[in-house]
Image: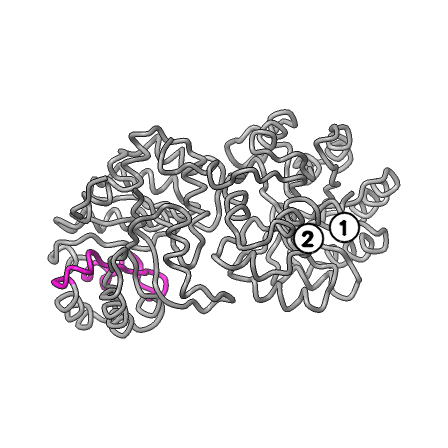
Amino acid sequence: MTAFDASRLIGQLEVTLDVDVLVGEYPDRDGPPGSPPAVLDVLAAHRVRAGAVASLRAALFDMRSGNDEVLALGTRAVPVGAVDLRDPVGAVREAERLAELGVRAVRLFPDEQGVEAGFPSVRHVARKAAALGLVVLTGGDVRRFWQPFAGLEATVVFLDTHFYHLGDFLVVAADEPGFHTSTRLLNSPDALETVPADRLLYGSRTPHYEPVVPLLRLATSGLTPEEIAAVAGGNARRLLG
Amino acid sequence: MIIDVHAHWGPWFFTMDVAGANLRAMDRFGIDLSIVSATEAVIYDAPAGNRALAAWLETQDRHLGYVTVNPRRQADAERDLAAYLPTGRFVGVKIHTDYTRSPASSPQTREALAMVAEAGVPALVHTWGASVLELAQTCLDTPGLRVIAGHMGADGFAHAIEAANGCDRLFLEPCYSHAPAGRIAAVAAAVDRTRLLFGTDSTLIDPASAFGAVAAAGLDAETADLVAWRNAARLFDLDITA
């Protein structure tokens, strides 16, 4: 054992649903392995029982075939449909197909797709997703990407909320009961303790980020055991089934 | 035993209330000693922040200080180095290149770092992306200077590897609010392990971030020991035994 023994601090924490998991590859970077078995193995190695999994193939190349890959995953994955904001017409068509198949959430990749919050496609997809009753998991800067979802009674999980922007999230979330945030970048000493626990969802971005970091932050947080259980999957199950 | 070579004392301007979080966070992660700079000195007024930190350090036994230098205020820097380094409570210099808009290659930062080399203490310098290469060049150009590349370039850790391998007086410190998979392991595999340090950016960032990222790298026991404290003790000439 070294001075950097995280398992002692993480203890018995078990995540029942990680809201931010990807399969597939980024062609513009090296590794890590993104095959579904490899990704599910990483989750299991960190005592994460299931992930809300989206496909990079769907996000970067072809929505339908990529989403069909995650639909075929087993019980350790909650399928999340990726839609391409570069094609808002096709994105809505795909969201409708996924909703009919029983998928509960779609994921937006604005950074990867070079899409800004003010583009018409984002507002269009946001409206349609809300009308379909789909939860939206979205990347992007929360200070900008809150806006296309405002006033729609949408249920949204902001996956990239950085603690630098915590205040912005808090003030928009106060007006939007459906706004939630991932824990991934809330790494300041009091961010997890500041967001209402029912709006927080454990997210790791496995396998592209180290799961140990959000696990350790949550395990050593000032939250109560009940709040930790909610953040570690209870809230995600409420939204995603 | 863990020494945190990149920590802070004082309040932040973000939505956070962490000014009093220091010892609690250290205890949680087994950090025995933190070397801190005053947030006021880093962000706004170096002499005022250094003065406040000097008074606070007199009441602490698990903290040492950095004298923060604003490269645009050389006279202040000279005065503060002369006032605080001899106290023994300050063991290095902190320079934030962004808040002072003074890149590592700028004339004023080169001049400030020459002053630090003259003082004989290490400097912790903020680096991001490819700027770590500028720091390496300035270090090579400044005889006797020892620098710690704060954040080891953050997302530019590949540049940090190149910088450390090109300058044997440059040390790497890993804190970063993101935790890309494999970042620490990649650096540890490519850089002389006697130049790897541990830092958290506490109280801006919870130590869970750096601690977890280093834990994920699965360092062997000897390397972990060097990173945790031995390299820092040697660099800062601290009288510490495990």
> Would you say A64 lies left or right of B62 here?
right
* Residue appearing at x 73%, y 51% in the figure: A136
Q: Are marks 2 and 1 on the same chain?
A: yes
Residue A135, numbered circle: 1
Which quadrant of the structure image shows residue B88?
A: bottom left
Question: Cβ–Cβ below 8 Å for labels 2 and 1?
Answer: yes
* Residue appearing at x 27%, y 54% in the figure: B124
* Residue appearing at x 33%, y 29% in the figure: B221
Q: Earlier in the sequence, mark 2 or mark 1?
A: 1
Secondary structure at badge 2 equals strand
**Residue A173 against residue B146 in the figure, above or below:** below
Which quadrant of the structure image shows residue A178?
A: bottom right
Where residue A13 sits: x, y (%)?
58, 40
Mark 1 is on which residue type?
A: Val
Q: Is residue B38 visible?
A: yes
Q: Which residue is mark 2?
A: A157
The residue carrying pointer 2 sits among few (fewer than 14), some (14 to 19) or many (20 or more) residues within 10 Å by Cα, namely many
Q: What chain does mark 2 sit on?
A: A
Please tell me whether residue A38 belongs to the stretch shown in magenta: no
Where residue A18 sits: x, y (%)?
65, 41
Where residue A152 sits: x, y (%)?
79, 62
Which of A68/A13 is in front?
A: A13
The residue carrying pointer 1 sits among few (fewer than 14), some (14 to 19) or many (20 or more) residues within 10 Å by Cα, namely many
The quadrant of the image that shows the C terminus of chain A is: top right
Residue placed furthest toward the front: A225
The quadrant of the image that shows the N terminus of chain A is: top left
Q: CA distance from mark 2 to mark 1?
A: 8 Å
Look at the image and give the residue range highlighted in magenta.
Answer: B85-112
* Residue appearing at x 33%, y 46% in the figure: B173
Secondary structure at badge 1 equals strand
